[in-house]
Amino acid sequence: MKDYGSIVKQDKAERRVSTVLRYLGLTFWGLLVLFPFYWMVLTSIKSYSSYNSEVVPSFIAKDPTLQNYADAFTAVPLAGYFVNTLIFTLITTALMLVVIVLAAFAFARLDFPGRGPVFALLLALMMIPNELVVITNYVTITDLDLRNTFAGLILPSVTSVFYIYLLKENFEQIPEELYKAAKVDGTSDLRYLWKVMLPMCRPTLVTIIILKVIECWNSYVWPRLVTDDPSRFLVSNGIQEIRENGFGRENIPAMMAAVVVISVPLVVLFLIFRKKLMQGISRSGIKG
């Protein structure tokens, strides 16, 4: 029979092997996920002649150059696309926050006639295919003569049933006794919302903001439908403009440089708020 010491050593060895295998698997998976980004950056620093002379793709840039990045801002109005996207993202996200916070608070705390059926009807809207919503929004924006305007880009995106539902569920996790006590002290609903509910649900709010920013930054179909004026293009729509009228279809390194520039803000945003994002996603409510 094995003594206790040998059993402990064997258990430690097995756990060590398990840990090594787990980290090897995670490392392999991480390299697999990051490889497309590496290839994008690598291609962006290759010269046009060097890239086209490669019979077999090289994993290292022999003569790296930053000329492609300079071309990204001179061949097409990429800076203008950035400004348009920034305006669209900031205004849309701000308006959406106002709408979903007030709606979620109303459904979570206010007692008004028909609250249950109205919320059920709101959730039922999530079952409508996006294609039908896009068609309806397009007709509405066209009838209002808002094509090629920021208002036409922004208005259809200022609310989200899913975000209202997500925030409502978080608000309902806050003990209702706090709300009743605040009302006894004469606190208004808006003050209670601002001072109590929003700080307690900050991780969820940060998650919603990040997801909305990513959604706006990557928006393609709707801006492509309601804008045909290059002065109103967003960065996602500008990629097609870059491909067709900027560098030409064969200048892949210059196109990749433009894509790298467009991708940097989202990567930086994720790196800064990754902990808050993970906390908000994993959070099911307030415990206590």
Image: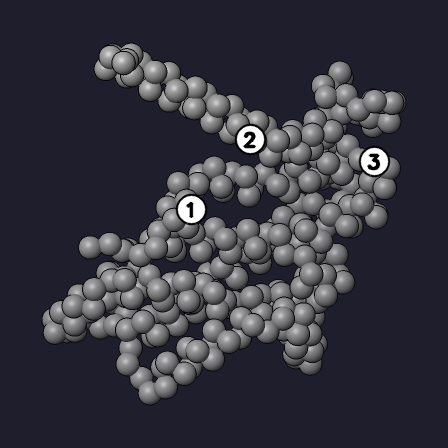
**Residue 155, image quadrant:** bottom right
- Residue under label 2: 30
* Residue 227 image position (x, y, % from top left): 72, 64
Q: Residue at x 42, y 67 (%)?
A: 164
Relative to the observer, which residue lies in front, 120 or 212?
A: 120
Residue type for callout 3: Asn
**Residue 145, image quadrant:** bottom right
* Above or below: residue 147 compared with residue 26: below
Q: Which mark is residue 277?
A: 1
* Residue 56 image position (x, y, % from top left): 83, 22
Mark 2 element type: helix
* Above or below: residue 134 compared with residue 262: below
Mark 3 element type: loop
Q: Residue at x 24, y 54 (%)?
A: 287
* Residue 40 image position (x, y, % from top left): 69, 33
Mark 3 neighbour density, 10 Å: few (under 14) some (14–19) many (20 or more): some
Relative to the observer, which residue lies in front, 13 or 203?
A: 13
Q: Are marks 3 and 1 in contact (CB under 8 Å)?
A: no
- Find the distance from the CA under tag 2 to the CA under tag 3: 29 Å
Mark 1 element type: helix
Q: Is residue 55 left or right of residue 152?
A: right
Judged by depth in the image, the label closer to the viewer, 2 or 3, is: 2
Residue 280 seen by the camera: yes
Mark 1 neighbour density, 10 Å: few (under 14) some (14–19) many (20 or more): many
- Residue under label 3: 251
- Find the distance from the CA under tag 3 to the CA under tag 1: 37 Å
Relative to the observer, which residue lies in front, 30 or 68?
A: 30
Q: Are marks 2 and 3 in contact (CB under 8 Å)?
A: no
- Find the distance from the CA under tag 1 to the CA under tag 2: 19 Å
Residue type for callout 1: Leu
